[in-house]
Image (cartoon, rainbow, N blue to C red):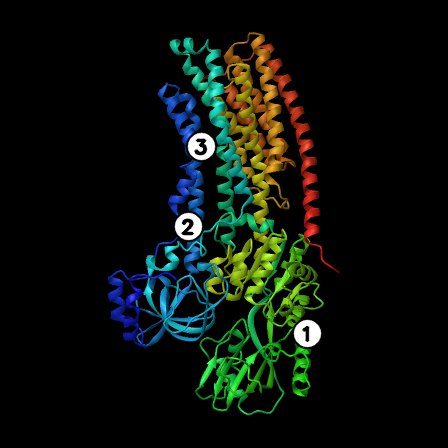
Amino acid sequence: MPEDKHHSHAAVRLAGASAQGLSTSEVAERVAAGQTNAFAQDTSRSVWSIVRANVLTLFNGIILACFVVLFAIGRWQDALFGFSAVANAVIGSVQEYRAKRALDRLALLNAPHARVMRDGAEAEIALDDVVLDDSLILRAGDQVPADGVVTGSRGLQVDESMLTGESDPVEKSDGERVLSGSVVVAGEGSAAVDRVGADSFANSLAAEAKRFSLVASELRSSIDRVLKWVTWFVGPVALLVLNAQMIAQGGWAEASASGAWRDAATATIAAVVAMVPLGLVLMTSITFAVGAVKLARQQVLVQELPAVEGLARVDIICLDKTGTLTQGDIVFDAAHPLTARPGWESVLSWYGVQKDANATARSLAGHFNEPAGLPLDRVPFSSARKWSAVIFDDGMWVLGGPEMVFPARESTDPVLRQLAAQAVELAATGRRTLVLAHGTPTSDETVPADAVPVVLLTFKENIRPDAAETLTYFAAQDVDVRIISGDNPQTVAAIAREVGLDAPHGFDARELPDDEQELMEVINSNVVFGRVSPDQKKRIVVALKAAGRTVAMTGDGVNDALAIKEADIGVAMNSGAAATKAVARLVLLDGKFSHLPSVVAEGRQVIANIERVSMLFLTKTAYATFLAIAFGILLLPFPFLPRQLSVTDGLTIGIPAFFLALLPNAQRYIPGFLRRSLTFAVPAGVAVTLGLASYARLAANLQIPEAEIRTGSTLILTIIGIWILVVLSRPVTRFKGLVIGAMMIGLILVYSVPIARDFLQFTDPTLPTALLVLGTSVACIALIEIVRFVHRRVAYRDAQEALHHRVSNQRVSK
């Protein structure tokens, strides 16, 4: 464990520390000295990272260089793409910043608190208000807010997996260190803070596990791959085009001497700029940001923008019962006496009023009011052993699950046999059962060998009204469900049946096999798992991921934190433990399980729309690259000015893509986003290149003027671009029709308004040019239709293969 200069003085400070905690004046002194836990850490991307991601990119650098060159040679009219790039960067940054502000506000409102002793009383304060030498009060479910030294421990167990990677809980005794970012999983204790703020261990590691970590995103990784490929092509293609343009201007020597090199440079920049898919990154950022803000309005906090996409890819969801299927409000049902033993009512009364009492224990308070004396000792609840105990003058009282307190399956004792039978019978009705047992105190925190069951307690849970509807939705979407809970498996199975799951019985997790293959067989064969420990929850999630499943995990307790962190998409309830919310990708702020279908729908909209938009941008990148290579090899003048390509891009891609990316779309997720996009974009790019290259060669042979060739080329590209837009928009709804119609009107205006015509250097086409434009456009449209027909067949085959793969993964032994 790391040490620092404060640690050598820890014992001195602890020796003088008062059980009363710091006084108000002592707190004020430390605040004035800057010894607070305040640490500037965003719950989402920082403003600088947003600006950097949208502005300081390689492609923006290329665009800036081209922009500067055109200004330097006096061709500012062809530098329109520079303003477009600036607009892209500004829009992308503003959208992400708006999303960041919305998410940060929600995170601030739902930030966890710390418990400390101040002026002799327990106080709940903001994490930033913890100061050096504060006395922390730690209970199960708490995330340690600052580094400290344990000053009191009652079975205190801490999970330091977020910091060390080791998932086994660590017992903490007096004098041992606890680190910020670790989680209390059992027991309780106190600690004196000796490192705060930026000096604490978690903050020194940037608290990466707690906040902005990268979730797997097929969209993001695929787009990054495309950008990398284009980066490798830009340089060589630019040299090839420049050489062709210089030769077309009479050769390097003549072009350099006559000043014609300026035209060559302008044509080269047109080719390079067309290859860069600037808008694709912008549209992806905007779509993620808008999706996150829309979900925030539905009380769903997205910890990272690409997580909007994540849940749409999920094919199995693991649910904790309490707080997910049920509302978590435990209600005491009845007491079923087993053995006559006086004093059990007062023991239950004592359990109900403890500060660290969980919901089950608190439900006892209104039913048992007999005063209890001061206990001699106690054994805190542990999620591993699933029982707690208290020792009074009359002996040791143990409260826990019947099968955990009395694990023997067979017994000759009629009371134990009655207990087992009655517990099974009650659990099958959906009730939770606990047994209160009595025996001689032990010194090693084990159930007394002479323990006898005194009373069997039953509790009820209210099922969430939205649970059945939500699970029906997932079933309709072919998403498998597994319930993994720490409660009695038969109780959980009964509740699962109430919400519509086919769960004739529950599997006891204590019987899970060690072999991974056998474990997967058990997971495939059962829907409900009970008595699952936190490590077993994590193991189930890891096993499913290893089997190729995309796993979501929902829960609210600290015992769910490990599994939620390990899952592809972790979903936490806002009512849950701070540690659980910290590692989740999504937090349901109002705790409504019914929001998950909305998240899935939003994710599907993001994936489907970005796929459609990406085909537009990647088609442009494909034909721009192929055109540059073809005209470079053929040594033909590049048939576009940069300003002409800017207008074409705006009418056929940029403007319509903005609307298409935000349309409703419920298409199911199918893996292989990049492959499907490229199987359309590359052949479509080849078709456009063949058409334009043929047109340019024929026009050159007919000795048509260069300005007229450029006009015709721009007209062909715009017509084909709008047709590609139509093809990818099918089925064409009224709104899509309006967008496409507006682009066609824009095309007419560009060619008919004198100011626009003069600026873009368009000329009236002669009859040969008009015929060539018409013939080339028709031929290219026919080729595009063939490409789309083949692409749809490929997409259908991909869908069938994905479905077959999913069915194979989801096979369940009958």
Q: Which residue is mark 1?
A: 428
The answer to whether the residues at label 3 and label 2 have Cβ atoms under 8 Å apart is no
In this orientation, which residue lies closer to the viewer: 330 or 10?
10
Disc 3 residue crowd, few under 14, some 14–19, many 20+, Cα 10 Å: some
Residue 723 in view (yes/no)? no
In this orientation, which residue lies closer to the viewer: 94 or 254?
254
Residue under the image location 56 percent in, 10 percent down: 700
Percent x, y of residue 159: 47, 65
Q: What's the distance in space between the residues labelled 1 and 2, CA to CA? A: 48 Å
Q: Which residue is mark 2?
A: 101
* Mark 1 residue type: Ala
Secondary structure of the residue carrying numbered label 1: loop
Q: Please state, as top left, top right, bottom left or bottom right, where the C terminus lies in the image.
A: bottom right
Q: Nearer the viewer, mark 3 or mark 2?
A: 3
Q: Earlier in the sequence, mark 1 or mark 2?
A: 2
The answer to whether the residues at label 1 and label 2 have Cβ atoms under 8 Å apart is no
Q: Please state, as top left, top right, bottom left or bottom right, where the N terminus lies in the image.
A: bottom left
Q: Earlier in the sequence, mark 1 or mark 3?
A: 3
**Residue 87 is drawn in which quadrant?**
top left
Q: Is residue 353 above or below residue 747?
A: below
Secondary structure of the residue carrying numbered label 2: helix
* Mark 3 residue type: Phe
Percent x, y of residue 609: 58, 40
Q: What's the distance in space between the residues labelled 1 and 3, CA to CA? A: 63 Å
Q: Which residue is mark 3?
A: 59
**Residue 683 is drawn in which quadrant?**
top right
Q: Earlier in the sequence, mark 3 or mark 2?
A: 3
Disc 2 residue crowd, few under 14, some 14–19, many 20+, Cα 10 Å: some
